[in-house]
């Protein structure tokens, strides 16, 4: 199998492999989720979050990342899950959507998986409402299910 490379407008090298796609894996309440590597800008550990008054409950606040204001989305709140305990450590996956930066606050960030696109299945009909709205599909791993998230749907609320 041959993989061709091309240079994008921003001069990053992009792999043009139509058979596989890379996904950054994360955990939220022990559920494994994935987001395309093409939209993830940064992965951060400890960050200082400033409270934003009158923001939707999904917005945990904002942070400064190299001089840019980043909106922090609490993925537990966005997906309708129980809140994290105050002493629980979190991580952040920074994504760009419509020229704005967003930090997805998750329990942990794992590996990058290169998955065959033709094995990604449609979301199951019995997927809970909050999940169904943001899931682009699922991938069956050996021991668990990876829910692949649609960043556009995730950040539209």
Image: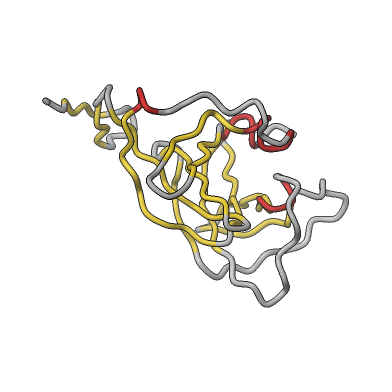
For the point 40% across and 36% down, the residue is 38
**Front position in the image: 21 or 62:** 21
Count of marks overlaid on the render:
0
**Which residue sits furthest front?**
143
66 shown above or below 48 = above
Closer to the camera in the image, 133 or 68: 133
Q: How is the image coloured?
A: secondary structure
In the picture, the quarter occupied by the N terminus is: top left
Relative to 14, is 156 on the left or the right?
A: right
Splitting the image into 4 quarters, where does residue 19 fall? top left
- Residue, far left: 2
> In the shown orientation, is residue 3 left or right of residue 151?
left
- The image quadrant of residue 50 is bottom right
* Whole-percent x, y for residue 15 in the image: 24, 31
Going by the picture, which residue comes out furthest to the right? 54
Q: Residue furthest bottom?
A: 87
Residue 125 x/y as whole percent? 65, 25
**Where does residue 73 sit, x and y in percent of width and height?**
67, 50
Residue 34 is situated, as x and y percent measured from the top left of the image, at 48, 43
Residue at image position (25%, 25%) is 16
Towards the viewer: 117 or 52? 117
| Image height of 88 relative to 105, above or below | below
Q: Quadrant of the C terminus?
A: top right
């Amino acid at each position: 199998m041959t993989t061709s490379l091309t240079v994008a407008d921003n001069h990053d090298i992009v792999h043009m492999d139509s058979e596989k796609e890379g996904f950054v894996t994360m955990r939220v309440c022990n559920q494994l989720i994935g987001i395309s590597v093409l939209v993830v800008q940064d992965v951060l550990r400890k960050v200082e979050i400033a409270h934003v008054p009158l923001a939707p409950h999904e917005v945990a606040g904002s942070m400064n990342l190299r001089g840019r204001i980043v909106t922090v989305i609490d993925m537990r709140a966005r997906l309708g899950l129980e809140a994290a305990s105050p002493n629980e450590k979190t991580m952040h996956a920074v994504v760009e959507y419509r020229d704005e930066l967003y930090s997805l606050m998750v329990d942990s960030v794992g590996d990058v998986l290169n998955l065959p696109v033709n094995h990604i299945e449609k979301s199951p009909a019995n997927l809970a409402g909050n999940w169904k709205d943001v899931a682009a599909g699922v991938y069956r791993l050996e021991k668990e299910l990876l829910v692949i998230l649609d960043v556009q749907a995730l950040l539209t609320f």
